């Protein structure tokens, strides 16, 4: 039977065409299955000289990421389209084309800023990061890379792929190829760099792993029932403006969230555009830092930001540059021949933001944060009042500053000398909660004082009117007697 099949095929090939009818096709299929050949017979048309070549010759060579080498012109990547919507063989080239459009490496970098604990420990900033276990994301103590390597990082990002694992996001891996080595970024890899999620404290509680849709909040249905309450705590706007459709402007933020947003746009949710605006994803992060809820995971935020920067058409910058550099250094991808670049990053200290937006003052009873533009005030009561004061003219108010502040407070209806009674649980409260309590207590006291003043004024007016009436009656009686 095998011999008959071979003679039949050779006979038809020598004739230069295939003879097609139902019986012959059925016989050919049956014979080829017996012979162990899986390749189907060609359709109509003549068979050229290359018809009997191996199937391997038709396969395209593969790139570093394992996809086939693309052929033909590269398609365009619209901003509103995800990279995953394109065939795998085009993704690496499309990402490289997107990065090249920036034309300058400075526009590509969103390097993290180093925060100063000593500068902000009295203003509640350090406490916010400690409460979520994010202190290393503030100080960059374990991965403050002075040099970054653009070529290796771009190659790693261009070849990046995502593996979810059994229990995402804790088992999620972002795997990129540099040279011939696959390098993965995961929760375990981040633990080797620094202790990022060291545990949520005050009170101690586990981390909440939110979905990608809830983190991004691009749709109103993912904002949740607490959205308006979060806006109320973060923004200083009239209640009539608070809604799920509210426009989020940075200038409307309260003082403390506004200070935190100066750092989150570099270290937590890195970006270089729309700095004057607050995005939906910023609201949840700022609320978590100010109040401790929800207990978001910084490691999940890192994986989310890097992957979104890879697949989004409108995000051309690369976030967490220093973290990615630390990863590639740890796995040994960076060599002596690697080209390095030193980014010019301004540290997050009081000296570098004092002259732009905020004024930091240390008074006798509180640490004060003032805004140049809106003259809003954020105060943290001092807990070191009994300690010896240092002679620091740059931070301590002089008499003229105190007098000017008193006039400002009186114009806003506040009472400078009023001392707020602290409840028994004061020591367990965060700086943000203390500030809100003090502010509300002073507003209530000012309203009560205003009511008392109005009542006293009314009482004085009534007494004066009664006195005038009595005088008129006495004059009237004297006139009638005369």
Image: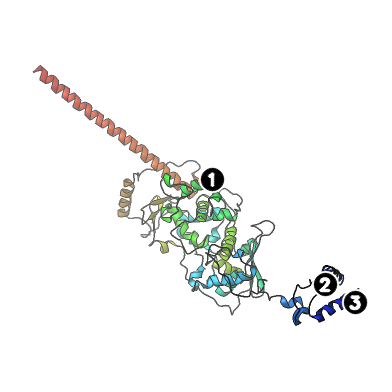
Q: CA distance from mark 1 to mark 3?
A: 77 Å
Q: What is the distance, in whole Å, between disc 2 and disc 1 at their CAs?
A: 62 Å
User: Which residue is labeled 3 in the image?
Assistant: 3
SS for dot 1:
loop
Would residue 382 be found to the left or right of residue 460 on screen?
A: right
Sequence order check, earlier mark of 1 and 3 = 3
Q: Nearer the viewer, mark 2 or mark 3?
A: 3
Q: Secondary structure at mark 3?
A: helix
Q: In the rendered image, is residue 62 in sight?
A: yes
Horizontal and vertical percent position of residue 457: 28, 34
Q: Where in the figure is residue 440, as x and y percent of width and height?
A: 42, 43
Where is 288 relative to 74, above or below? above
Residue 315 appears left or right of 387: right
Q: Quadrant of the C terminus?
A: top left
Callout 1 environment at 10 Å: few (<14), some (14 to 19), or many (20+)?
A: few
Residue position marked by numbered label 2 in the rendering: 37
Q: Which residue is mark 1?
A: 225
CA–CA distance in space, label 2 to label 3: 15 Å
Q: Is residue 24 left or right of residue 221?
A: right
Q: Which residue occupies the foreground of this view, 351 or 242? A: 242
* Residue at 33% from the left image edge and 35% from the top image edge: 452
Q: Earlier in the sequence, mark 2 or mark 3?
A: 3
Q: Could you tell whether 116 is left or right of 449 in the image?
A: right
């Amino acid at each position: 039977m095998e011999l008959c099949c071979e003679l039949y095929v050779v006979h038809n090939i020598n004739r230069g065409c295939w003879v097609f009818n139902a019986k012959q096709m059925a016989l050919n299929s049956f014979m080829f299955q017996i012979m162990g050949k899986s390749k189907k017979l060609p359709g109509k048309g003549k068979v050229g000289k290359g018809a009997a070549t191996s199937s391997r010759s038709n396969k395209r060579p593969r790139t570093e990421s394992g996809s086939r080498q693309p052929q033909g012109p590269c398609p365009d990547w619209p901003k509103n389209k995800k990279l995953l919507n394109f065939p795998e063989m085009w993704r690496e080239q499309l990402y490289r084309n997107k990065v090249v459009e920036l034309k300058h490496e400075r526009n590509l970098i969103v390097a993290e800023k180093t925060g100063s604990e000593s500068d902000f420990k009295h203003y509640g900033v350090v406490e916010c990061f400690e409460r979520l276990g994010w202190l290393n994301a503030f100080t960059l103590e374990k991965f403050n890379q002075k040099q970054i390597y653009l070529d290796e990082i771009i190659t790693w990002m261009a070849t990046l792929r995502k593996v979810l694992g059994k229990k995402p996001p804790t088992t999620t891996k972002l795997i990129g190829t540099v040279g011939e080595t696959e390098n993965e970024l995961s929760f375990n890899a981040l633990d080797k760099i620094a202790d990022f999620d060291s545990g949520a404290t005050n009170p101690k509680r586990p981390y909440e792993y939110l979905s990608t849709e809830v983190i991004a909040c691009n749709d109103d249905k993912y904002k949740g029932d607490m959205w308006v309450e979060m806006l109320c705590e973060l923004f200083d706007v009239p209640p009539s403006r608070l809604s799920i459709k509210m426009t989020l402007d940075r200038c409307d933020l309260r003082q403390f969230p506004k200070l935190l947003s100066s750092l989150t746009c570099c270290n937590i949710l890195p970006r270089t555009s729309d700095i004057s605006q607050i995005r939906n994803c910023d609201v949840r992060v700022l609320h978590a830092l100010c109040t401790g809820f929800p207990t978001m995971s910084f490691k999940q935020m890192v994986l989310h930001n890097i992957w979104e920067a890879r697949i989004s058409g409108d995000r051309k910058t690369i976030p967490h540059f220093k973290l990615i550099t630390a990863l590639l250094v740890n796995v040994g991808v960076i060599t002596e021949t690697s080209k390095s670049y030193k980014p010019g990053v301004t540290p997050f200290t009081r000296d570098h933001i004092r002259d732009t937006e905020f004024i930091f003052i240390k008074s006798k009873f509180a640490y004060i944060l003032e805004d140049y533009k809106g003259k809003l005030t954020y105060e943290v009561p001092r807990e070191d009042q009994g300690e010896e004061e240092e002679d620091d003219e740059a931070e301590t108010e002089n008499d003229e500053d105190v007098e000017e502040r008193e006039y400002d407070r009186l114009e806003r209806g506040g009472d400078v000398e009023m001392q707020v009674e602290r409840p028994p649980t004061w020591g367990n409260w965060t700086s943000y909660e203390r500030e809100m309590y003090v502010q509300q207590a002073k507003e209530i006291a000012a309203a009560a004082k205003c009511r008392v003043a109005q009542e006293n004024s009314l009482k004085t007016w009534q007494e004066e009117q009664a006195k005038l009436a009595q005088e008129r009656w006495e004059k009237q009686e004297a006139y009638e007697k005369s």
